[in-house]
Amino acid sequence: MRSLVFCTTCRYSQSEATGADGRTGGQTLIDHMKDVVTEKGRHDINIETQACLWNCKRHCSVVLRDDQRFTYFTGDHVPERAQAEAILAWFDLHGATMTGEVPFREWPGAMRGHFIARIPRSRP
């Protein structure tokens, strides 16, 4: 199972809990990702949400989860469409590997500097 898990409660910015429309940064990023996935006709991407991923100093947080490869915990995402597109592009590269290890030179530029932890897959 592969999924993107977004924190719903992440701040919009360092100085603002919500944007001008009253949504959190997390909710704004989720909505951008849903738009990107819909526009690309992607039915293979499971988008999940979670209130508070305990990464408040590095908001917006997203877990790139996979039960067959490494899972990655990421943060410092800006709640913008371009960031949602970069997250999806990196996740596609991740899914094309056997282990979930994407060579750094292949990473979309907007994904550099966002990785916090690499989590091994669960073993039976």
Image (tube, rainbow, N blue to C red):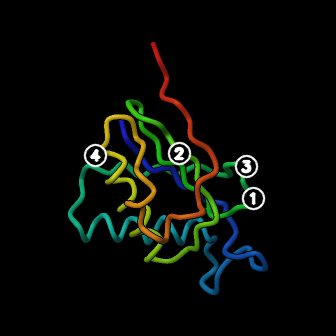
Disc 2 marks which amino acid?
Tyr
Q: Are marks 3 and 1 in contact (CB under 8 Å)?
A: yes
Q: Residue at x 54, y 55 (%)?
A: 6
Q: Quadrant of residue 20?
A: bottom right
Residue marked by disc 1: 56
Q: Secondary structure at mark 2?
A: strand
Vertical order, 89 against 43 (above or below): below
Q: Earlier in the sequence, mark 4 or mark 1?
A: 1
Tell me the SS state at disc 3. Answer: loop
The picture places residue 39, in percent across and down from the top left corner, at 25, 71
Residue 54 rendering spot, x and y as whole percentages: 73, 49
Question: What's under tag 4, amino acid-wise?
Answer: Ala
Mark 3 or mark 2, which is nearer to you? 2
**Identity, as a three-letter code, of the amino acid under mark 1:** Cys
Q: Nearer the viewer, mark 3 or mark 4?
A: 4
Q: Which mark is residue 96?
A: 4
Q: Label 3, label 2: how many angstroms apart (C-alpha)?
A: 15 Å
Observer-side mark, 1 or 2, equals 2
Q: Secondary structure at mark 4?
A: loop
- The residues tagged by marks 4 and 1 sit, at their Cα atoms, a distance apart of 31 Å
Residue type, numbered disc 3:
Trp
Residue 72, which numbered label?
2
Q: Earlier in the sequence, mark 2 or mark 4?
A: 2
The residue nearer to you, when weighing 24 against 2, is 2
Badge number at residue 54: 3
Q: Residues within 10 Å of mark 1 (few under 14, many from 20)?
A: some
In the rendered view, tell whether residue 38 sits above or below residue 99: below
